[in-house]
């Protein structure tokens, strides 16, 4: 019964009652402040989670899981290396490729780009960008045809369309002429364009047939390296190292986690910093809860004194106000979690609506590598945010509840 009346008393003080409009109003403001601060933290972390997930998904859809290259030039004995790679557990495909920087020229327009020579038939059976291309574009890349596929952003910069003729200038393998050495150059016909969703590739990658690239870069029958597709992308670093050791060492190995490690490190660092910074909003809301409860204690001095004269002890009074503060915290944090989750789930729709109303595009794909603002709500984040917020609210209620328990009945009733 003792615990019951303390809980009932605490919940009664939260509800609005006649003559307590202002006190109930500031209690509601405390709940709103908690809800908004928790919701903002959830939305921000959800955006960071969504950005990281989307970036990882797009990277894995357009790039190789791992690469094996020679240390000082082409990959030696690429055939043996490919056969060994295919025998490694977890390897789905081992694709030879030729890759180098080149200058693309279309009339008066030019742009630097990474030119990659591939075998379209083999690439189509593996995980990657080429597997997502239309069959007609893959068939257009035939050995000796000197056709090229451009990223849509690169094609736009060059002003190139399907059927346009480009000149590829290679910085390697210079040709001796009567006027001196000149870079190799070759005309290619644009057979199509592709869109990967990653501006880094849409602007900086061009695809040609492996044989044509080897001739352009004067590699003969050699290749730059092997691109590996594996069953578990997170195991790619281990698999490519084991492959290099199985071949006797002396190779340069890389994988998607190393190539794009700066992106993921910056995202994790940003998430940690934002969590700490935005946690200060919850702390401010918790301090506001302190002020609210102190005012309620001051306004309820007579009620506390009457309870003390009826036999309630300091612990009972303290429990009643702890219940009140805890209830305010639970309602505010619960509303914040619900609001933050709802906004995060509808964030792309809200952002598109704001862009339509203001005419401003919030995400530049040249900087953020994507056009939309993704959001992914992680249950662990919700639990962590709610736990920290409730802990701060619990700490905030200790002083007002302790102050209420120290009320002396004689002093409180002296002027009543």
Image (cartoon, rainbow, N blue to C red):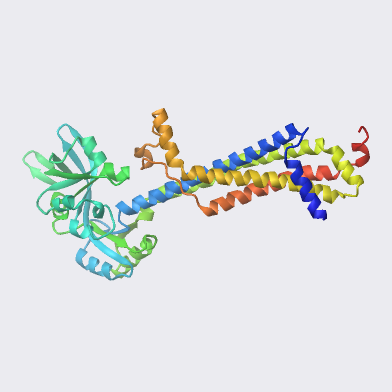
- Residue 241 position (above or below residue 314): below
Relative image position of residue 74 (x, y in whole percent)? 21, 57
Q: Nearer the viewer, residue 148 or 354?
A: 354
Q: Nearer the viewer, residue 324 or 135?
A: 324
The residue most toward the left is 178
Q: Quadrant of the C terminus?
A: top right
Position in image of residue 349 (x %, y %): 42, 40
Q: Is residue 396 left or right of residue 378?
A: right
Q: Quadrant of residue 358?
A: top left
Query: 34 and 24: which one is in front?
Result: 24
Q: Residue at x 35, y 65 (%)?
A: 239
Q: Residue at x 74, y 46 (%)?
A: 11
Q: Residue at x 14, y 59 (%)?
A: 221
In the picture provided, is 63 more to the left or to the right than 220?
Answer: right
Task: Give the vertical position of 24 relative to 262 (above or below).
Answer: above
Q: Quadrant of the N terminus?
A: bottom right
Image position of 36 (left or right of 146) = right
In terms of depth relative to the viewer, which is nearer, 108 or 277? 277
Q: Can you give x and y, in whole percent of width and height, for residue 148 in the image?
A: 16, 46
Where does residue 100 sit, x and y in percent of width and height?
22, 49
> What number of labels is visible?
0
Left or right: where 45 falls relative to 416: left
* Residue at the (63%, 38%) spot, across then down: 32
- Residue 394 against residue 237 in the figure, above or below: above
- Image quadrant of residue 373? top left
Residue 1 in view here: yes
Q: State which quadrant residue 109 falls in.
A: top left
The reply to whether residue 407 is visible in this rendering is: no
Name the outermost residue toward the front. 18
């Amino acid at each position: 019964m003792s615990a019951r009346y303390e809980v009932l008393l605490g919940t009664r003080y939260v509800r609005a009652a006649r003559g307590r409009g202002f006190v109930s109003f500031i209690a509601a403001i405390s709940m709103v402040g908690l809800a908004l601060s928790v919701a903002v933290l959830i939305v921000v972390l959800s955006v960071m989670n969504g950005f990281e997930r989307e970036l990882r998904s797009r990277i894995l859809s357009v790039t190789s899981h791992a690469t094996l290259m020679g240390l000082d030039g082409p990959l030696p004995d690429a055939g043996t290396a490919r056969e060994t790679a295919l025998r490694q557990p977890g390897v789905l495909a081992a694709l030879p490729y030729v890759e180098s920087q080149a200058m693309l020229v279309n009339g008066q327009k030019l742009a630097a780009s990474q030119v990659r020579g591939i075998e379209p038939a083999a690439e189509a059976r593996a995980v990657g960008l080429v597997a997502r291309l239309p069959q007609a574009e893959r068939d257009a890349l035939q050995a000796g045809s000197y056709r090229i596929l451009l990223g849509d952003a690169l094609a736009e910069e060059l002003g190139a369309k399907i059927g346009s003729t480009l000149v590829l200038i290679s910085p390697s393998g210079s040709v001796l002429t009567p006027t001196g050495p000149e870079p190799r150059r070759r005309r290619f016909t644009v057979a199509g364009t592709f869109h990967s969703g990653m501006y880094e590739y849409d602007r900086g990658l061009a695809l040609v047939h492996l044989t044509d690239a080897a001739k352009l870069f004067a590699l003969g029958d050699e290749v730059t390296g092997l691109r590996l597709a594996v069953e578990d992308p997170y195991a790619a670093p281990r698999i490519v190292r084991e492959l290099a050791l199985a071949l006797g060492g002396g190779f340069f190995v890389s994988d998607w986690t190393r190539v794009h490690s700066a992106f993921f490190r910056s995202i994790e660092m940003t998430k940690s910093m934002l969590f700490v910074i935005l946690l200060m909003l919850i702390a401010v809301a918790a301090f506001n809860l302190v002020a609210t409860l102190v005012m309620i204690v001051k306004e309820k001095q007579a009620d506390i004194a009457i309870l003390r004269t009826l036999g309630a002890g300091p612990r009972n009074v303290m429990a009643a106000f702890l219940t009140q503060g805890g209830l305010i915290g639970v309602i505010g944090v619960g509303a914040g979690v619900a609001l933050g989750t709802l906004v995060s789930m509808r964030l792309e729709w809200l952002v598109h609506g704001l862009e339509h109303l203001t005419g401003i595009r919030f995400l530049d794909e040249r900087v953020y590598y994507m056009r939309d603002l993704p959001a992914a709500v992680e249950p662990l984040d919700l639990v962590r945010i709610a736990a920290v917020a409730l802990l701060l609210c619990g700490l905030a209620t200790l002083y007002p509840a302790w102050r209420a328990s120290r009320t002396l009945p004689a002093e409180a009733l002296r002027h009543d």
